[in-house]
Image: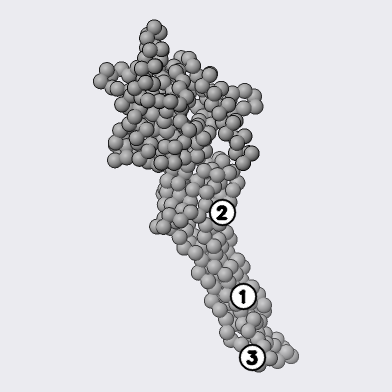
Amino acid sequence: MKFIDEARIDVIAGRGGNGSASFRREKFIPMGGPDGGDGGKGGSIWAEADRNINTLVEYRFTRMFRAQHGENGRGADCYGKGGDDLTLRVPVGTVITENESGAPIADLARDGQRALIARGGKGGLGNLHFKSSTNRAPRQTTAGEEGEELRLHMELKVLADVGLLGMPNAGKSTLIRAISAAKPKVADYPFTTLHPNLGVVRVDSERSFVVADVPGLIEGAAEGAGLGHQFLRHLARTSLLLHLVDLAPFDPEVDPVRDARAIVEELRKYDEELHAKSRWLVLNKTDLVPEEERASRIAEFIREFGWEGPVFAISAISGGGCQPLVFAIMEHLQQSRAVLDGA
């Protein structure tokens, strides 16, 4: 299935039915009085998060969604039937906003969470509501209200604890394959990852976390180079970012320090809040550096990059250094959760 993480749709809630103007007509009951019933309410439109759905592809090709109208009222005190509600099922993590203003409407971050996105119109009143001692044969009714009509922007932000960040071919997909059961495509050319991949990392029988791998960034992504910034939204909900750097690029013209700085700058251009998230440096492909040079190469990179945070040296292809990284991530996440629970 094609991965679609953004869609724009039009929703139109149902119109309420009109009230009825009717009078009771029965043998031996002269002047039976008004008996026109109310119109039924229009159907509303809801959005519901469903963990069995992982893409917004259904809303990319079907753009218009209408709920059922309410029925008109009838005589003999018969009220019109209300229109059926319409439920749009979306992936967990979907954010829905008003398209023009950007006003938030719903953030569906839990499976089964529901939100009303367009309310159906009220049904009109029948003439039985207007009878009085001075108006015994009212002919007044009211029309049903129109349902809400909106143009919506739907955006999927995948739910993950840890996000992988880095240049194309930094080894992000190889790392997620090494530490989880996810099997994203791995190849010796750039941009092998074309959509986000999620992997569940099981530390032991009771502890696990979710890692998100997004397509690589390159310098100039803010101006549309490469795949641009379009997938960085999927890192917005993460608690920790892992900045992967290829410590041993095949091209001698490539400067890992320059590339690492470019990634940080692109992150800042996209979103200051995302730029401020906890970020660890992961130096990958250490197996390609001679063992006697490894420590000095790592120290030189850290010094030139000016990094002061946590650093991990790994080889994703062989698994070297991955286990300490996984345990450190789990400990960090547990501490973060404990702080949130105590807040």
- Residue visible at 50% across and 69% down in the picture: 146
For residue 181, say whether it is visible.
no
For residue 118, say whether it is visible.
yes
Q: Which residue is mark 1?
A: 38
- C-alpha separation, residue under disc 3 versus residue under disc 2: 43 Å
Look at the picture and state if 275 lies above or below 300: below
Q: Where the C terminus falls, by quadrant? A: top right
Nearest to viewer (mark 3 / mark 2): 2
Q: Earlier in the sequence, mark 3 or mark 2?
A: 2
Q: Which residue is mark 3?
A: 135
Q: Classify 10 Å Cα crowding around label 3: few (below 14), some (14-19), many (20 and above).
A: few
Q: Earlier in the sequence, mark 2 or mark 1?
A: 1
Q: Classify 10 Å Cα crowding around label 1: few (below 14), some (14-19), many (20 and above).
A: many
Q: Earlier in the sequence, mark 3 or mark 1?
A: 1
- Residue visible at 46% across and 30% down in the picture: 279
- Residue visible at 56% across and 40% down in the picture: 52
Asked if residue 97 lies left or right of residue 86, the reply is: left
Residue type at the position of mark 3: Asn
Give the percent coordinates (x, y) of residue 78: 65, 75
- C-alpha separation, residue under disc 3 versus residue under disc 1: 19 Å
Residue type at the position of mark 2: Ala
- The dot on residue 115 is 2
Give the percent coordinates (x, y) of residue 112: 60, 46
Q: Residue furthest left?
A: 253
Q: CB atoms at circles 3 and 1 under 8 Å apart?
A: no
Instruction: Between residue 1 and residue 225, name the one nearer to us.
Output: 225
Residue type at the position of mark 1: Asp
Its colouring scheme is: one colour
